[in-house]
Amino acid sequence: MDTSTGQEISDALGVLLKRSTRTQLYRTLTAGVGEAVDELTYPVLSGLARTGPRSAADLAPDIGLDRSGITRRATQLESAGLLRREPDPHDRRATLLALTDKGEQTVKALRQRLSDHIEASLASWPPGEAATFARHLHRFVTDGPFT
């Protein structure tokens, strides 16, 4: 692989990782889902779906927010019945954030929206090219510079 390929991948990742890119995607995904679910609360829901119950401090580095930002968003999600707070069995002073059944269903619907959004954006690609891209992207993420 030559340097131009690495640079091309690096440039593409730069666009994907920009906060404004993520915010716009989250805004698109959460449109019309409910007042508590928006581009600000989506990362908390998604992060808890990936990791299971976590404290705000433990979740913070995974989703790129500070603890107080997570706590504010968790309060909004808790009021909507999407999240609950429960005692940490390993530390009586700590509280874990956990998705409720309604929260899990909301994440499932949001993930389906994301999948549909991606599929629609790939609809014009030649047959098989999207599947090849998906395999290579998965390989890049699991075997590439992130490991």
Image (cartoon, rainbow, N blue to C red):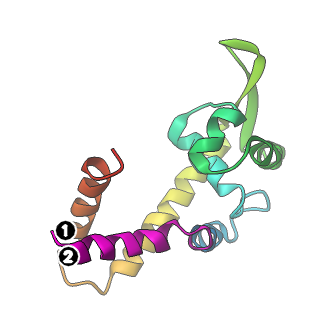
Q: Is residue 27 magenta?
A: no
Label 1 secondary element: helix
Residue placed most toward the observer, 83 or 53? 53
Number of callouts: 2
Residue drawn at (20%, 76%), measured in percent from left and top? 129
User: Residue 2: x, y in percent?
Assistant: 17, 72
**Residue 5 colored in magenta in the image:** yes
Residue at image mark 1: 132
Location of the C terminus (image quadrant): top left
Give the secondary structure at mark 2.
Answer: helix
Q: Which residues are magenta?
A: 1-21
- Amino acid type assigned to the residue bearing label 1 in the image: Thr
Callout 2, which amino acid?
Glu
Mark 1 in CB contact with mark 2 (< 8 angstroms): yes
Disc number for residue 66: none
Q: Which residue is mark 2?
A: 129
Taking the spot 66% from the left edge, 44% from the top edge, the residue there is 102
Residue 137: horizontal and vertical position, in percent?
A: 28, 61
Image quarter of the N terminus? bottom left
The image quarter containing residue 131 is: bottom left
**In x, y percent, where is residue 48?**
60, 41
Marks 1 and 2, Cα distance to the nearest angstrom?
5 Å
